[in-house]
Amino acid sequence: MPLAENVIVVGAGAGGLAAAISAAASGFDVTVVERGHAPGGKMRQLRVGGQDIDAGPTVLTMRWVFERLFAMAGADLGHRIGLRPARLLARHGWRDGTRLDLFASVEESARAIADFSNRENAAGYRRFAAESAAMFATLRPHYIDAQRPSALGLMARIGFMKIGEQLALKPLSSMWSALSDCFSDPRLRQLFGRYATYCGSSPFLAPATLMLVAHVEQDGVWLCDGGMHGLSRTMEQLARDLGVTFRYDAEVTGIEADRNGVTGLTLQDGERLAAGSIIFNGDVSALAGLTGGPAGSGVAPTPSAERSLSAVTFAMTARTSGFPLTHHSVFFSDDSASEFDQLTRGRTMPTVSTTYVCAQDRDDRGILPAGVDCERMLFILNAPADGDTKTFTSKETGQCLDQALTHLSACGLTVDQAGMDLSPTTPDRFHQLFPGTGGALYGRAAHGWTASFRRPGSRTRIQGLYLAGGSAHPGPGVPMATLSGMLAAESLGEDRASTRLSRRAAISGGMSTA
C-alpha cells in the first residue's frame, strides 16, 4: 500500500485497539506500537500471589459498542468472548451496618430501596432512573455516538426548539443538588453521587448530566470470561485477524510532521517508522511533548487543577469473612462532603475513603467457586492526581491500606492479613504508566457544564494526526474510549477517502448514526 494508507496507532488501550480494528476493517495497513508488553492500557493485569488480577477497570457496560465494533470486522462479540449479564449490579455497605443491593431491574432496585429507606425514596429512585435514561437517550445520538460538537452544535443537533429536552439535561445544576430533588435519604444521595467518580469527578462539582452514568450501568453490567483484560486480549486477536501488526515494548519519543501533515514517528531506541496517518491513543497531556509543543497540534495539556481523580489501588489475594461480598461491592464513608473536599480542594487522601472492592472470583450473587480459599480482589480508593509532584512512600501506602482495612472492618468485612499478598499502585505510579497524566485516570474532570466541550475531538491541527482514548471525546471509561477509537478511525477514513484503494469491510451508517 502507498504511504497514505499506512496507519500507526500509538497505544494498545481500548481506544487504540478499537481504532486499529476499525481502520484495518476499512482497508488500511495498521501497526500498533505500545510502550508496555501487553494490550489493554488501563485494562491491565498484575500477577499477585501466583494469580492474575485485573488491576484497572472492572465493569463492562454499553455492550452495544463492542457488538458494533466486532460487527465492523465481520465478527460476533458473543462468539469471541463469554459475557454473562449481572442481575445484582453491586452491594453497598455503610459503617452503621446497613446494606443495599442494586439490580438490573429498576423495579427490583426500587423495592430494595423501599425496604432500605422508605417508599418516598423508592419513588424518587424511579424518577431518577427515568431522568437518567432520558438524558442518555438524548445524548447518545447527538454527543456520545457522534464527532465532538460544540455546546451550540449540540443544541442544534438536539433542536433549538426542543427546550424541554435541553433543560432535561440539567447542565447548570450540580449532580448533588439534583440528587437532593430525588432522595431525602443522605445515604442514597451518597450512593448515586458516586457515579460521578466513574468520570473521575466530584458529585459536588459535576453537572447533573452525569446522572446518565447511572443509566449506563442500569442498562446492563456484564462479567467477562478472563476479566476485563480478557476483553483486551480478545480485541487484540480480532485486530491480528485483520492483519494488524503489534509492536510491544516500543516507546514513542516523537511524532514527526511537515507542512503537509504527519510523516512518521521515532521510538526510544532511535528507530523511525514512516506513517501517512497516526492515531494517538494516549492522554492528550502527553501529546505536546511528542509534537514539540501544543502550538502545532492545537491540543493543550490539561491543567493540573482540572485533572480528574487518580486512585490508590491494591490488587490482592486474601481470605475474607463477615460482609457477604458480591462481584462488585462499595463501602461508603460517613461524610461525602468532607471526603470530596479533601480530594479536590485539600489535594490529600481523605481521612476515611469510600472503598470499592471487586471480588473477582465471585459471581454477581457473591458465590465463590468450589475450592477457592484466598480470593482475588481489587481495592480502589479515590486520590488526587498529583503523581507528577508527589511520591507516595511505602509508609504512606501502608497507611492507606491500614485505613481501608479499618474502614472495611467497621462496615462488617474482615480481611485476614495472615497470608495476604498484594501489589499497590499509587498516583505517582499511574503517572509513570500513563505519561503526562499526573496519575489522572479519566483525563479532564467533568467539573462545570463546559468541561465536556473542552475535551478535544478526534482531529488535530496536524493533518493525519488523530486522537483516541479516555481524555478525548466522548470521555473516559472502556466503552467511551472504545467509541473514541472508532470515531478516530472514522475521521481518518473520511479524510483519506479520495486516496483509498481498497476496503475489506464497509462501515455501515458511520458513527453518527444512532
Image (spheres, helix red, strand yellow):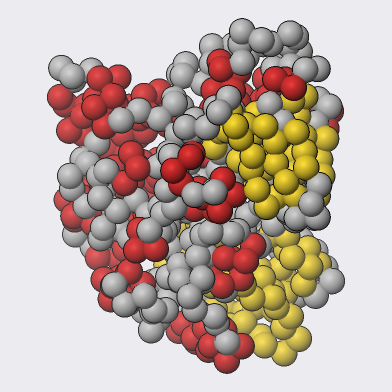
Tell me the quarter of the image containing the C terminus: top left
Q: Position of residue 305 (x, y in %)?
A: 34, 63
Q: Position of residue 228 (x, y in %)?
A: 67, 50
Q: Do we see residue 201 in this rendering? A: no
Q: Tell me what residue is drawn at x 55 percent, y 82 percent.
A: 392
Q: Which residue, as the protein is rendered here, is positioned at the far front?
A: 259
Q: In the drawing, does residue 316 fall left or right of residue 288? A: right
274 horizontally vs 204: left or right: right
293 over 146 or under it: above or below: below
The one nearer the camera, 293 or 367, is: 293
Is residue 165 visible in the rendered image? The answer is: yes
Up/down of 222 relative to 260, above or below: below
Q: Is residue 420 above or below residue 512?
A: below
Residue 63, percent from left and from top: 58, 34
**How many numbered circles does the render carry?**
0
Residue at image coords 41%, 54%: 302
Q: Residue at x 57, y 91 (%)?
A: 395
Q: Quadrant of the N terminus?
A: top right
Q: Quadrant of residue 235?
A: top right
- In terms of depth relative to the viewer, which is nearer, 49 or 438? 438
Front residue of this view, candidates 358 and 444: 444
Name the residue located 81 percent from the left edge and 40 percent from the top edge. 246
- Residue 391 horizontal/vertical position (percent): 54, 80
Left or right of 412 on screen, residue 109: left
User: In the picture provided, is 4 more to the left or to the right than 208?
Assistant: right
On screen, residue 346 above or below 244: below
